[in-house]
Image (cartoon, rainbow, N blue to C red):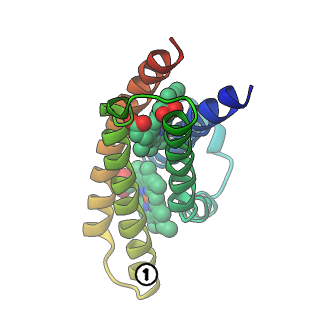
Amino acid sequence: MVDAVVILLHPILGFSMAIWLYRQWKIMKALKTKKGIMWSKIQDKKRSEIVNEHEVSGRRSLLFISVVIFFAVVADAYRYFKLDADISSIVSLHGWLGLILAFFVYLMYRSGTKIVKQREEKENIKQVRGIHQRIGDFLVWLLIAVVFLGFLRLLDILQ
Ligand code: HEM
Ligand code: HEM
């Protein structure tokens, strides 16, 4: 029972994080293209309101991803010490890509807060917003890979 909780906590949190990150990205895309299901959900709101929500939730991204990785490490340690798992089964491609993903979330955090600062100082935000946009696009592809490999990793561990 404890085994299941410790091992499943990270996948559940990780999957929630993935949905949250995807929405964070998709909403800002819909704001630009003014198309799709996401746009129909947000079109009644003011633009400034949506951007503000994006900033407020974006600022939690570092905390969120740290919690996800913390519970991955807890699960690894638990399997190693309590369930006598092999040391070679501790790190995986999913784990490495997950850490790279965390680094990209950090870059999003940095470029995002930089845009806010530039906007407040009435500077031109175009360049940094372009960087923020491109890192974000890459992040979503990486995210899909991490989630897919995460499911495979879970199957591997549960078998
Ligand atoms: C934001 C998303 C995620 C990040 C950053 C992330 C990151 C990590 C890291 C750093 C590890 C530890 C290294 C390792 O054991 O290989 C790990 C382990 C693991 N991840 Fe994820 N992960 C994410 C999402 C998911 C999802 C969606 C699933 C499954 C549906 C999942 C399943 C697992 C499993 C089963 C382990 C092994 C844990 C254990 O040893 O018991 N992860 N993840
Ligand atoms: C955590 C993951 C994040 C993702 C996936 C993400 C994604 C995006 C995307 C796709 C855009 C649209 C870019 C464009 O097409 O021009 C955008 C814009 C923006 N983001 Fe983020 N973002 C994240 C975090 C943050 C954070 C932490 C902040 C600041 C606290 C932030 C602040 C902004 C601002 C100010 C804009 C420009 C809005 C405007 O056009 O007025 N973002 N973001």
Q: Is residue 1 left or right of residue 136?
A: right
In this view, the residue in front, 84 or 21, is 84
x and y percentages locating residue 128 in the rendered image? 29, 68
Displayed quadrant of residue 16: top right
Above or below, comparing residue 155 to residue 66 in the picture: above
Q: Is residue 33 visible?
A: no
- How many C-alpha atoms fall within 10 Å of the one at disc 1: few (<14), some, or many (≥20)? few
x and y percentages locating residue 92 in the rendered image? 33, 32
Which residue corresponds to the image point at 48% horizontal and 49% vertical from the top-left? Answer: 28
x and y percentages locating residue 100 in the rendered image? 31, 48
Which residue corresponds to the image point at 55% horizontal and 42% vertical from the top-left? Answer: 17
| Three-letter amino acid code at the position of disc 1 | Lys
Which residue corresponds to the image point at 34% horizontal and 62% vertical from the top-left? Answer: 107
Residue at which label 1 appears? 117
x and y percentages locating residue 115 in the rendered image? 39, 72
In this view, the residue in front, 35 or 81, is 81
For the N terminus, the image quarter is: top right
